[in-house]
Image: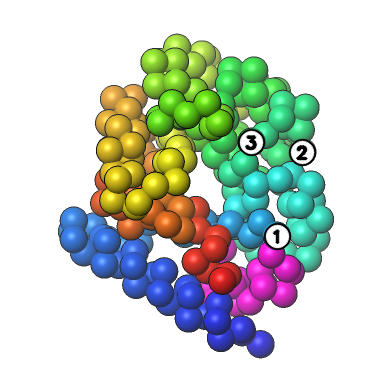
Amino acid sequence: MILLGIGENLSAVRGEIAEACKKISRNPESVKIVAVTKNRSIGEINNLIGLGIRELGENKLQELLEKIDSVKGVNWHFVGHLQSNKARKAVEICEWIHSVDSLKLAGKIDSAAGEIGKRQKILLEVNISGEESKYGLGPDELGDVIGEIKKTGNLDLRGLMTMAPLIVAEETRGYFSDLRELAQEFNLPELSMGMSNDFAVAIGEGSTMVRVGTKLFE
């Protein structure tokens, strides 16, 4: 049985995505919804899967491990801060790791992927706002880090990720445009930016993945 609230929420999110794409003549299918399932029940998650969502995001590895046996047929995205000593388990489970924020972590992921014969899709997390409370590479570090990653054998660097400050949605635009420019500079196609409060603005600035939780489940 599909919970009506989740169905209505998903329709509303898809509608907002379509409207944001229409404004800039983009195909809505160019935007991937990554449903963030933090603190959500298996029932809620499976209801969302029943509505066609296949990309799920988790912030904490332990919570993901608790859910994985009960949630089937999806691609998991790790979107939270990942400790390097947990990189192996994340590589075993996740299709995407959005939050690679250091060369040390990238090296751990590369080694783990090599051990299991996998090419791991990753995004580099950039602290575009410069907030001390946020993880991520500084924009001026990207060139050197990308250069080192290109020397690895098991990392598939697809793009960049960021979190904008928690401010009025329209005021986040500059942060997202700055990240888009960095992605263009390094010829990276994927941009994971935009959450429940600001994903429409992020889409306007080129986001290809929006990480939506609250607007889907509440």
Look at mark 1 in the image and give the residue it sits on.
39
Q: Which mark is residue 89?
A: 2
**Residue count near mark 3 (Cα–Cα under 10 Å), binned few <14, some 14–19, many ≥20:** some
Q: Is residue 122 left or right of residue 187?
A: right
Q: CA distance from mark 3 to mark 1?
A: 16 Å
**Residue count near mark 1 (Cα–Cα under 10 Å), binned few <14, some 14–19, many ≥20:** few
| Up-down relation of residue 72 to residue 210 (above or below) | below
Q: How many marks?
A: 3
Instruction: Identify the secondary structure beneath mark 1.
Output: loop
Q: Amino acid at mark 2?
A: Lys
Residue 81: image quadrant is top right
Of callouts 3 and 2, which one flags the residue occurring earlier in the amino acid sequence?
Answer: 3
| Up-down relation of residue 82 to residue 150 (above or below) | below
Q: Which residue does the image show at 38% across and 55% down from the upper left? A: 199
Q: Quadrant of the N terminus?
A: bottom right
Q: Is residue 101 left or right of residue 59?
A: left
